[in-house]
Image: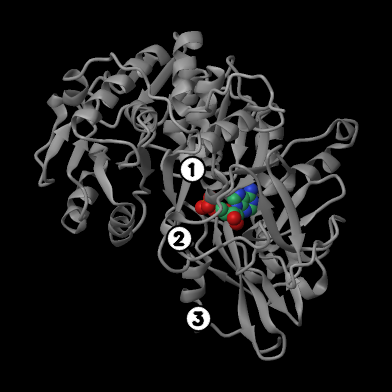
Amino acid sequence: MQGLMIGAPLLISDLIRHADRHHGDAEIVSKRVEVPTKDGSGAIHRYTYREAHARSRRLANALKKLGVGATDRIATLAWNGYRHFEIYYAVAGLGAVIHTINPRLFPDQVGYIANHAEDRIVFVDLSFLPLAEKVAPALKTVQHYVVMTDRAHMPQTSLPNALCFEDLIEGSDDRLVWPEFDEKTASCLCYTSGTTGNPKGVLYSHRSTILHAYAAALPDALNVSARDVVLPVVPMFHVNAWGLPYSCALVGAKLVFPGQHLDGRSLHELFEQEGVTMSAGVPTVWLGLLNYMKEHKLRFSSLKAVVIGGSACPPAMIRSFQDEHGVQVIHAWGMTEMSPLGTVSTLKGKHLGADKEAQYAVQNKQGRVLFGVDMKIVDSDGKELPNDGKAFGDLHVKGPWITTSYFKGEGGDPLRDGWFPTGDVATIDPDGYMQITDRSKDVIKSGGEWISSIDLENIAVAHPDIVEAAVIGIRHPKWDERPIVVAVKKPGAGITREELLKFYEGKIAKWWMPDDVAFVEQLPHTATGKLSKLALRGEFKDYRLPEST
Ligand code: AMP
C-alpha cells in the first residue's frame, strides 16, 4: 500500500520559488567583478531573492530563445556572484545541466572538460575572458559565449558569438512557469580535479541536490537559518560552494558573494560591512584572514561560525578562531563525489561537560555522518574494520547524494559492493566520529606499518614559526618509505631543522619521527587549493635521506 501524499518531485526551481515567496526581501549582496569607480561606488551589487528569481526567469527565457533544452550542458567560468547564482537557477530550472568549470585548472584541462561535457554555452566573468579566449579555438561544441557584464563594460573579445549577459536579461520577460519533471533528472556537472588521469565528471540530480540542501542546513551540519548572513568563500565552481546557494535559499538566509578578492583584507571588510554570521572555506583562505587580522589587530563583530573543510583543518586554526575570536569552528569533510558533505564535527550532548581539551580532540576529527550518508572502513580485502578509533582503513560511503558512476562511464564502475571508495584512509570511533589519517596514496608506508602524513603536518603547523607544511614519504632501502617535512617558515622566523624535529618529541611514537626537514619558500597547490603532494613528490624525486637513517 502506498502512502497518500502529494507526489511533488524535489526540484531545484522550488528552492528559488520558495525563497521568493517566503523570504522575498532577504538580500543577496555581491562584490562586483566589474571595476568600481574611483570613489568605490559600484563595487557592491545588492538585491533580493525576489529580484533574483525574476532575473533567473528572464535568463531562462533567454536561454530557451537560444535553443537550450533539457539535458543541454551550460558552462560557467565565474566567481561567486549574483549572476552566477541566477545561472544556477535558470539552467537547472529548465531541466538543463549547469557545468561549473574550475578556472584554476590548466587551460588544456578546461578545454578537455568543456569538450567532454559537450557544453553548448559558456558564461564567462570578465576576469576569465583571457582564459576563455585562449581555450575557445579548441572547444568543439560551444555555440555561444555570454560575457557576464552589462553593455557599458562589454569588452572587445575574440570569442565567437559573444553575447552580453545584461542584454539577454533585458531582452526577455519574466513570465515563465518552471517546468515539472522527474526529480532524478541531472541538474549539475562538476569535474573532480583528478590527481591522476583526466578529470572525471560527477553528475548531480535535482533530488540529490535538494536532499543534500536539507541535510546541510541542519543544526548539527552547517546550521544555517533565516537569521543568518552567509558568505560562501568556497567557490561556486567547487562542488557548488558546498551546496550553500541551495541551502541558503531553502532557509531564506541573506547571502553575501565575495567575487574575486579572497585575501584577508577584502574578506574582513565584507564580513564587517554586511554583518556576516557564518562563512565557509578551505584552511588556506582562513590562514590568510587570521594572519591579516593579527597583523592589524582586528576583531569580528558579527561572525559566529566558520565551516572549514576541503582539507584537514589544522588544530591550531580551530583554537585561534575559538579562543582568540570567539568564532565557532565547524570542521567538515566531503568530496565532489558526495555533493560534497559527508561528515561534520559537532559535539554531542555528552561532550558538553567535558574539558576544553577533550572537546578540541573531538573537533579535530572530521566528524559524524549526516543522515543520508553511511560510512565504513575496510582493510585491503574489503573486510570491515572495527569502529574503535584505532583501526584505520579505506573509507567507503553510500547514500542518495553520492555518485554511482562518473559522467559517460569514465573510469568504469567505481563502486565496491554498492559502496563508494573515497580514497581516504580513516578511523571511526565508538561515538561515530571519523578521522582522516591520510589519502590512500599519501599514507607513508614504513616497515609494513602506516604513518599518517596529516598528523605529522598538523604538528609542524602548530609550531609558531611555521606557516604551512607537507609531509611526504621518501624511498628508503630498509623501511620502504620514511617521512620528511617540507615546511614554509613565517617571514623572518629563524627556526632550524633540529628545532622543528625537537618539537615532535613526545607528541608521536618514535618511529613516526620525520627523518628530515626541508624549508621551502612555498608549497605547490592544486586547482582547488589543496596541497599538491603529487607535484611535491615530483620536486623531491632526487632527494636523498640523511645518511644516519
Ligand atoms: P574534492 O573532491 O576536491 O573536494 O576533494 C575531496 C578530498 O578532500 C577528500 O577525499 C579528502 O581527501 C579531502 N578533504 C576534504 N575535506 C577534508 C577534511 N576536513 N579533512 C581532511 N581531508 C579533507
User: Relative to 59, is 155 above or below?
Assistant: below
Element type at marker 3?
loop
Of the numbered discs 3 and 2, the one sitting upstream in the chain is: 2
Instruction: Quickly name the residue at label 1.
Output: 204
Q: Is residue 44 visible?
A: no
Q: Which mark is residue 409?
A: 2
Q: CA distance from mark 3 to mark 2?
A: 34 Å
State left or right for residue 112 relative to residue 245: left
Q: Residue at x 85, y 44 (%)?
A: 431
Which mark lies nearer to you, 3 or 2?
2
Of the numbered discs 1 and 3, the one sitting upstream in the chain is: 1
Q: Is residue 78 visible?
A: yes
Element type at marker 1?
strand
Inspect the image, locate mark 1, and give the three-letter code of the amino acid beneath it: Tyr
Can you tell which quarter of the image residue 368 is in?
top right
Q: Position of residue 278 (x, y in %)?
A: 58, 27
Q: Position of residue 495 (x, y in %)?
A: 62, 62
Instruction: Quickly name the residue at label 3.
Output: 541
State left or right for residue 2 relative to residue 402: right
Q: Residues within 10 Å of mark 2 (few under 14, many from 20)?
A: few
Q: Residue at x 28, y 47 (%)?
A: 119
Do the residues bearing badges 1 and 3 touch, measured as CB atoms within 8 Å? no
Inspect the image, locate mark 2, and give the three-letter code of the amino acid beneath it: Gly
Element type at marker 2?
helix
Q: Quadrant of the N terminus?
A: top right
Can you tell which quarter of the image residue 45 is in?
top left
Do the residues bearing badges 1 and 2 touch, measured as CB atoms within 8 Å? no
Q: CA distance from mark 1 to mark 3?
A: 38 Å
